[in-house]
Image (cartoon, grey):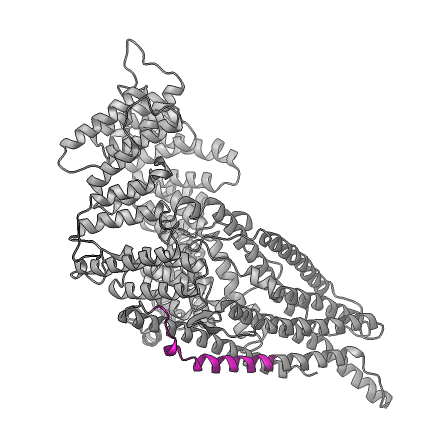
Amino acid sequence: ADYLDNGNNKMAIQQADKLLKKHKDLHCAKVLKAIGLQRTGKQDEAYALAQEVAALEPTDDNSLQALTILYREMHRPELVTKLYEAAVKKVPNSEEYHSHLFMAYARVGEYKKMQQAGMALYKIVPKNPYYFWSVMSLIMQSISAQDENLSKTMFLPLAERMVEKMVKEDKIEAEAEVELYYMILERLEKYKEALDVVRGKLGEKLTSELQSRENKCMAMYKKLHKWPECNALARRLLLKNSDDWQFYITYFDSVFQLIDESWTPPAEEEHSLEGEVHCSIEQAVNFIEERITEESKSSRPLRGPYLAKLELIRRLRHRGCNDEYKLGDPEELMFQYFKKFGDKPCCFTDLKVFVDLLPPSQYTKFIRQLLDVIPLTVVAENEVALPGDIKALQQHLCVVQLSRLLGIYHAMEKKQKLAVVRELMLRYRHGLEFGKSCLKTELQFSDYYCLLAVHLLLDLWLEGEEAAVWQCLTLLEEGLSHSPSNAQFKLLLIRIYCRLGAFEPVSELYSSLDAKHIQHDTIGYLLTRYAGSLGHYAAASQSCNFALRFFHSNQKDTSEYIIQAYKYGAFEKIPEFIAFRNRLNSSLHFAQVRTERMLLDLLLEANISTSLEESIKSMSLSPEEDDIPWKDLRDNRDLTVLFSWDPKDRDISEEHRKLSLEEETLWLRIRSLTLRLVSGLPTLGHTIQPKNSEKTAENGVSSKIDTIRALLQQLEAAVDSGKKFLEQKIQYPVLGPPPTRMAGFFSNGSCQCQTSLFYLVSDIYELDTNGLEDSAEIQERIGNSFKSLVERLTDLFNKCKGDLIEVRDGTLKTHPNLLENLVFFVETISIALWVSSYCDSVLRPFKSNLQKKKKKKKESSVAMPPVFTHFLDYVTELQTLTSNVIDHIKGLEIILTALKLEELSLKDTLLLQEEKKFTKTVQGKVQSSYHHSVQEIGELLKKRLDTIKKLKI
């Protein structure tokens, strides 16, 4: 066992063998040997050995534990259940084995069996947790039931009765048990009963979370529309803590609900269960004013009351009745707020919510008013006034962010914008002085200046200023050198490098972000969208692996979380874990990565290192199966991960999200159908020709071609939808979701090429079933397809021609679309070759039959059917075309190597010496990345050329 723990699996196997020589039937040694075999890649031997032990139904703890570990490593949790089912039969009173059995069922989600196992445990050892395990398993059955009616009429009422029994017998002990009762009543929509539980004696047990009882009461009051109670409770909680924002929201919601219902408090008795109720605007206004007066006496400044006043103004304006209640001018209130909290980083995000209370005509005046109160010192004449400490710097930063948000920078001319960029960078470099003692992992106080300068340059770039994008990269690289942990710098660099078509620097940037767990799903798209499409195949493989490893381990990990939740009685978390798992399983990104990963593997290996058939078999792909949950696809991407200070009309909107999801789904459908069509090719190959009757198609194969024809129709439909979508000419914001590769796929002709290749498959199949005799028409059709395919592929190649990087007026311009086209060309030619090898497998047997006939008849002139010459010409032309592309790529490599970037006269001589250093680095990275892409594409094409040479019939 020690050897296994240290990862020395071979020694572990040797030691186990020694032991087994002495004690032939030592179960535990056999299992430990099996674990060693499993870890050295001998899965089959390991499985056989384990089953040998399992068949003996061991009951010693060591063997059971070891087998559990082994099955878990094999990803076969269902075998653990069988193991403990047998153990429990032999040792029926073992609490330990029963609880292991329960957990084994939990791993595979067998809720009904969990319920039974829980009750069996409770009978052996009447401990409360076991009883409630069983109750929770009923709730899980209700959640997973397809039929909602069933869960409301059977599972939940049964769970409720089980808990009620314990309540009546006064056996409720722990907080978790009350939580569970509340959860059942809430799911049954018995809100009044749930409220009684929380307010009653049982509710006293709810102590682990702050305000747990109050929050639960509030939720029930809302469900029951008891607005007086909502209001009174919120009011009471705000008196205790006037900084708790959620209760302000509830307080306002309920006040206005009560006003709309013209509710009046009863004359004699209490206003409500929770005490006094406010039901008029006057009361609300006074209440907020009182909170502000109270705040001025408190020892530390609280933001809540001031923001609540702005919130109230906003709501009153919305109702068109603000002016009657002299709450003050929002502009003045925001100015006062800034004076009080401007040196806190949260000041900007607090005010951002309320800027729409300002009239646009006041924007510039408002900003000037804020600037006037910041203590900045002028060092020399005509110099920029700079902050003397971190507080003043934070205040100034807040104003700059607000200027951007109010659109003041957007309205400027190019010259003004450049002047602002200069000023911001000056302030950024000056601000670095305050952060000299910062650790590597801390951000510099002035980092936002640099980011804002880059945002301004991005505006200029989008307006057609080519040099601006290089300056963006320069400033970001400089920023990163001073603040190596700044994720915003890294994310923005990733986006810009990808827009320019340079993937190489991105891999390193992304891995330094150290994305954890769920982030592989939320920001993984930044990586996987570009790796493959820019020709970095190895990096693409790796980035898909990162993501897939996370998605696959999520399955296993979630089971462990659920088990821990049972052990510690955190029942309300269990449905959350299940929902989390489902959300990840139906993640759009997961489906994309799976599909692209398989296409990539085929591209790099099929018919190069292994045959297409073997590759597809190893991925267990089949054209009939579609494992993508189209109806439930969840877009888990975080599209706001990049900070943006843009005004609402320029920022990413809900509409953008919807459109992006639609586009991603359409593109995924096209890719998934392409993959399934390719996976159908090997299924058409026939092994033995039926004797004498070439026309009898076996049922098996004929249904296979039907599958392919059906998929082809679906592909046509998906392509049509895709084209319709693109007609809308959608422009996402520059920092919004990146567009898919769909537009390029259609415009460069890859799409038409790939679809006609699959139509060709159908024709060849027809030729195969009809034979050569009376198929002149089909043969001609195939010949024409070959001709038009070569033309289309040549067209596609022409769209790849041109310089990838060119120097124009002293600035670099990259052409990522040429690179993307080259990548599509490689993919399309690969599909063409897979289809050709299918043609080859059909034509070869025909040819050998003809040669046999020739010998029999001893005639020298048996006419060769035209399809053979068509195919030979086609293969020869493919070979020539591929050789030409390889030569073109060699040419690109030479040009890229020869580019002397140093000689670029950077027109903007305003660049400081240190900036020049970063500019050089940035341009070098882009050049090297393009060089790398071209090399990888060239290497792959050479391998494909070798496979073409094998195709001569």
Q: Which of 221 and 412 is in front in this view?
A: 412
Residue 302 drawn at (x, y percent)? 20, 36
Residue 725, position as x, y percentages in the image: 59, 52
| Quadrant housing the N terminus | bottom left
Q: Which residue is drawn at 27% across and 70% down?
A: 914
Q: What stretch is highlighted in magenta?
A: 882-908
Q: Left or right: 613 with respect to 497? A: right
- The secondary structure making up most of the magenta span is helix
Residue 265 appears in view: yes
Residue 818 point in image, percent of width and height? 53, 70
Please report the residue visible at 41 percent of the width from the left and 27 percent of the height from the top.
Answer: 190
**Which residue, as the protein is rendered here, is positioned at the far front?**
381
Quarter of the image where one finds residue 876: bottom right
Is 51 located above or below residue 886 in the figure?
above
- Locate the C terminus by quadrant: bottom right
In the image, residue 669 above or below residue 613: above
- Considering depth in this image, is 600 or 747 the residue closer to the camera? 747
Q: Nearer the viewer, residue 792 or 200?
A: 792
Which residue of the protein is positioned furthest toward the top in this rendering?
A: 268
Q: In this view, does 171 lie to the left or right of 602?
A: left
Q: Can residue 2 be seen in this view?
A: no
Query: Magenta span has 889?
Result: yes
Q: Residue 125: which quarter of the image?
A: top left
Write the residue at 40% across / 43% down.
Answer: 575
Residue 291, quarter of the rendered image: top left
**How far across and how far down the image is residue 124, in percent?**
33, 42
Q: Residue at x 27, y 37 (%)?
A: 334
Is residue 433 found inside the magenta-colored segment of the image?
A: no
